Amino acid sequence: MQGLAYGLAAGAIWGTVFLAPRVLQGFSPLQVSAGRYLAYGLVSLVLLPSAWKELRPKIRRDDVVTLLWLSAIGNLLYFVLVTAAVQLAGVAPASLTVGLLPVTITLAGSRDHGALALRRLALPLLLVLAGMVAINVDLFLYAKNDGHAWSGKLIGIVCAFGALAAWTIYAAWNARYFSKHHRFTGHEWSLLTGVATGALAMLLSVPAFFFGHAAVQYHAPHAWAWFWFVCFFLAIGPSVIANAFWNSASRLLPLTLSGQLIAFETLFALLYGFVYELRWPRLLELAAILLLVSGITWSAQRHMEPEH
């Protein structure tokens, strides 16, 4: 149950990620991603000295290489694509496309040691997929009223699927590496990930803030203040705290189950979106939520049952 609680907490915090590009609509995806992970790197550097004495002897060359690759794929690339998807297609299409992570991660981890046979997860996964179908039907039923060009929507959906692929690779790779190397706690691994991501974000900040139309676009001082407030919120909440929760969940749970829990990120993103838009969910949206929760709950129950 502790692993499930960690996964739920990570999903609840990660759900806020999909609102950030919406409230920072005037900034480019590169700027939002660079700002978030520069802040993540700074926060990690502030927190690192207290743990550095114990961490230093543990770190090996393979850890550094892995951290850089994981940071590039699962943080920078993923969030650039998510930001572009939200700004071009909207919060719902982006969060719901990335919401297919429970399916893709379950498939990625289906051959891992301790993973539940896919035949026992078939019906729960069908419920999750049915929920995704319901929410996408709702999206296209109401798409004509949102004012976005169809070409922009299409590019946004492509970006969302790219983000889905990037995070599937990250989640599977991170879970397998972290579960095999017990030298680090979830918090320590999160801090090291922050430092690695911050270093890469410094490189990304050059094209983000100094080249291109978006880089030279004028923003008032209060807009920049809001930009950095949101970036540091994302650094402390979804990056440091939620990543530590997720690392702990990854160590306690098989990948097929932890993959299911990522659907809670989608549910919380939808909830926050409804609050932001000051409305109740429509009938198909509510049906999708119920199907997702049912599928995840059923999958969790299957993992706790003895396999015959």
Image: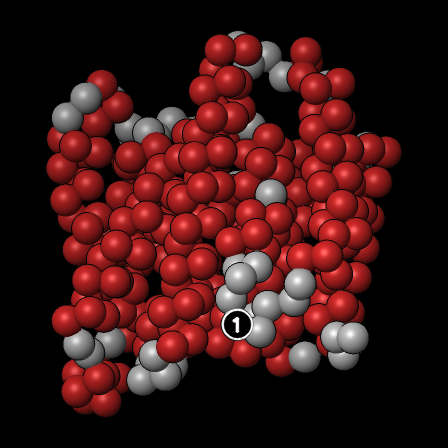
| Left or right of residue 141, residue 235 in this image | left
User: Measuring 33% from the left and 73% from the top, which residue is drawn there?
Assistant: 189
| Left or right of residue 20, residue 93 in this image | right
Q: Which amino acid type is shown beneath numbered disc 1?
A: His
User: Measuring 66% from the left and 34% from the top, which residue is drawn there?
Assistant: 277
Residue 82 position (above or below residue 154): below
Q: Residue 215, how many percent across, how many down?
A: 21, 27
Residue designated by label 1? 113
User: Measuring 40% from the left and 54% from the top, which residue is drawn there?
Assistant: 170
Residue 258 showing in the rendered view = no
Label 1 secondary element = loop
Report the number of numbered marks: 1
Q: Residue 237, how many percent across, how many down?
A: 45, 61
Front-lying residue, 22 or 176: 176
User: Measuring 16% from the left and 32% from the top, which residue is drawn there?
Assistant: 207
Q: Residue 107, how many percent across, how many down?
A: 57, 52
